[in-house]
Image (spheres, helix red, strand yellow):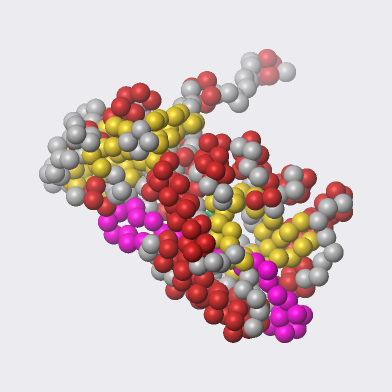
Amino acid sequence: MILDNHPFQTNKRGHLEIGGMDSMELANKYGTPLYVYDVSMIRENCRAFVNTFKELDIKAEVAYASKAFSSIAMLQVVKQEGLSLDVVSEGELYTALQADFPVEKIHMHGNNKSLSELEMAISHDIGCIVIDNFLEIEMIENLLKKYNKTIDVLMRVTPGIESKTHKYIMTGNEDSKFGFNLQNGQAQEAFHLLHNHKSIRFKGLHCHIGSQIFETGSFVMATKVLFEHIAIWNEQDGFVPEVLNLGGGFGIRYTGEDSPLSLHTFVEELVQSVQYHASDLNIPLPEIWVEPGRAIVGNAGITLYTIGAVKNIPEIRNYISVDGGMTDNLRPALYGATYEAVLANKADYKPVNTTSVAGKACESGDMLIWDLPIPEVDNGDILAVFSTGAYGYSMANHYNRIPKAAVVFVENGNDTLVVRRETYKDVVKNDLSYSEEKIEM
Ligand SMILES: *Cc1c(COP(=O)(O)O)cnc(C)c1O
């Protein structure tokens, strides 16, 4: 049964339960499509990272990559759990400030940070900027002069590792828009600009090799490559990194095909590989930073949809259409991401058919799931898609002028609306008119 692949249960009425609530009640109360998060699972995921480092007695920082799902309520939960935060834009930084997130725990990323983004970061004294390119070094220098400030930075490098994941979410390979290339000397050049800088406090290196990774091998390889360069810089310039940031990318289960490692195992193996290289080089163990996004929120979120048209094309395929799709979950259309789902109101029924789940947008590519095993479907049934907590709401869009769905947090049997459903007024709120007078001019 599909439900066995996911950390959710049915209640006495045979309905899918989320955070102690009947999902059907949530669908009735808030309407669909609806993103629902089990907040206790978000907390568990945060604690799995933090506690593993604690148990291993390692100085570490766990930064939630807020691009996976950013909203004021979400960032408040992250703050309550004591994590740090990654932002990649002014909008994400603005959200963090609105959530009163401690600025010293905010790190800024991005391969094309604008002057105003950097200015916002520096003027608010955020904790760290992860430098991606030469232009950025120049802009940061000028801003630090203007504000008479200093700031901690890491240098993002590409270790030339091809992680086993989709090309669109692979980021550590040499041919990448992110970071300084270690192989061709560009990282070396940047290192010399940053090392012993007066106002830019160069703390160490950052690499993020990709997303939805299921094995520790790529991380271990990346660590090895980083240390090959650290060894050179240590010998030539006495460089000792205070921080090594190994990025995010820890895989989660979307379908029964995915078998993620426990977060504990993941963290433990990363730590061991850093420990090995640091002691080999005879330098103190740097602080280890990680940046999970998906692994914090992915499996804690479910999307509820109402099923409309049911279309059976004999000998070809069965389709059901839902009241959302690529507008609330772009991942299947963007890079063929796979999901599993059950009928929330028939969660304990055995599948008797297979059907494919289509979105309502005018694109043949707007398919959420191909060939899903499913019980007899009736119009009006509620479909619950699992593991939609990451890169769902954060990639939502207005294609076909479909308003963005609402987000509800559930914890210990209590439900709270944390992002309201958009109205049609919201959809046209930036539209201005172009009157006939313009033609006569
Ligand atoms: C996207 C990203 C992350 C988070 O990736 P997940 O797969 O969600 O864990 C972390 N760090 C950087 C630099 C990223 O770009």
- Residue 327 vs residue 87, the one in the foreground: 87
Would residue 298 appear left or right of 245 to someone viewing this image?
left
Q: Is residue 330 visible?
A: no
Q: Quick check: 316 above or below 420?
A: below
Would residue 244 appear left or right of 337 to someone viewing this image?
right
Magenta segment's dominant SS is loop
**Residue 52 falls inside the magenta stretch:** no
Would residue 348 appear left or right of 359 to someone viewing this image?
left
- Quick one: quadrant of the C terminus? top right
Q: Quick check: 362 above or below 429?
A: below
- Residue 220 vs residue 210, the one in the foreground: 220
Q: Is residue 285 visible?
A: yes
**Residue 259 falls inside the magenta stretch:** yes
Q: What range is drawn magenta here?
A: 232-260
Quarter holding residue 236:
bottom right
- Residue 184 vs residue 237, the one in the foreground: 237
**Residue shown at 15% from the left, 44% from the top:** 351
Q: Quick check: 308 above or below 349?
A: above
Q: Quick check: 67 above or below 400?
A: below
List x then y, in percent, for residue 133.
70, 62
- Residue 351 vs residue 107, the one in the foreground: 107
